[in-house]
Image (cartoon, helix red, strand yellow):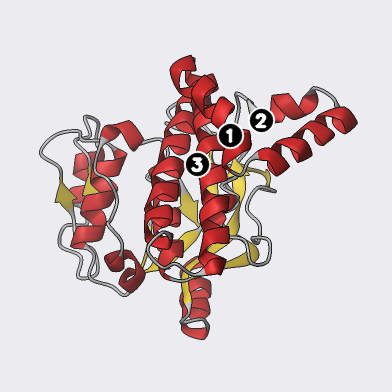
Amino acid sequence: MVDDGSTDHFREVFELYAGHSNIRVYFNDQNRGVSYTKHRLLELAQGQLASFLDPDDAITPDALYTMVSAHLLHPECSIINSTHFVCDDKLNVERVSEKPKALPKDTPYLLVGDGSIHAFATFKMTAYNKSRGLIPERKFDKAIDQDLYYLLEEHGSVLFINKPLYYYRIHKGSISNMGQERKAMIEHFKLVEMACLRRMEKLAKTGKPEDKIWFTKYRVRYNYSKILRGVRSGNWFIAIPSAIIYPFTGGADHLKHYLSKVRTNGLSVFKRSFVETYKH
């Protein structure tokens, strides 16, 4: 447990567990944000499996047993995630989220990036330790979990358990919803671009024909993300150049498919692309 410089009674609550044999308690020297704190938690972790439980949420009684069992059955998986309950600010269940779901066959999460990997996400520390690790900077606080998933899938496969194991609470203090969706999405786009560049750099060195295909797919995703990030942030110096080169760097087919969806479904397609809210 890491307290990130809380100013309420939580320090007293944390200290109640300080002598527990199975719980270790730490305090940041000041409020440093989610990215720094999660980075620190993973540096302090000693177990083989890891997951985050945010202080405003909860897990079901069988969540840990279910996930440990799944990891033992699937040593090839770096991430195993489930769906979750969406709750009000009192943690009363409103529904089971429809967002988390299994990935399409032979499709990396980075090429989907739609939030289908969500809480409850568990992962192997061996996979995490092979990655560059989380970036401990506030500028990615609202999307740091997505960065984690992109890093982990580079070192193993992903498995989805279609069972709610997590209680996700929606409240005004949240850093990624209730009016914070736009900022979270902009941060997410930047992390997508960084992940694409990381994979493109690796693929460019192999010289394999099949890797050239994947290189093109990640380049398309990279430029598409830059377009969306530029539009959402109002930075046309990013959006316009990326939109101009997009059809000539592998994005022509995607653009044709997108425009065909516009003809079929109307302007609602644009709304989904540039939506201001995120449905958990």
Q: Nearer the viewer, mark 2 or mark 1?
A: 1
Quarter containing the N terminus: bottom left
Q: Position of residue 178 (x, y in %)?
A: 53, 25
The amino acid at mark 1 is: Tyr
According to the picture, the residue beneath numbered tag 1 turns out to be: 246
Position of residue 119 measured from the top left corner of the image (x, y, whole percent): 51, 53
Q: Is residue 84 above or below residue 209?
A: above
Mark 1, Cα crowd under 10 Å, few <14 / some 14-19 / many 20+, is: many
Which of the two discs, 3 and 1, sits closer to the camera?
1
Q: Nearer the viewer, residue 228 or 243?
A: 243
Q: Is residue 210 above or below residue 150?
A: below
Q: Amino acid at mark 3?
A: Tyr
Q: Earlier in the sequence, mark 2 or mark 1?
A: 1
Question: What SS does tag 3 mark?
Answer: helix
Q: Is residue 36 toward the left or the right of residue 276 in the image? A: left
Q: Position of residue 77 (x, y in %)?
A: 48, 74
4 vs 185, nearest the viewer: 185
Residue drawn 54% across the image and 62% down it: 81
* Element assignment for label 2: helix
Q: Which mark is residue 273?
A: 2
Q: Earlier in the sequence, mark 3 or mark 1?
A: 3
Which residue is label 3 attached to? 222
Secondary structure, mark 1, is: helix
Viewer-nearest residue: 12 or 77: 77
For image coordinates 28% across by 33% down, the residue present is: 138
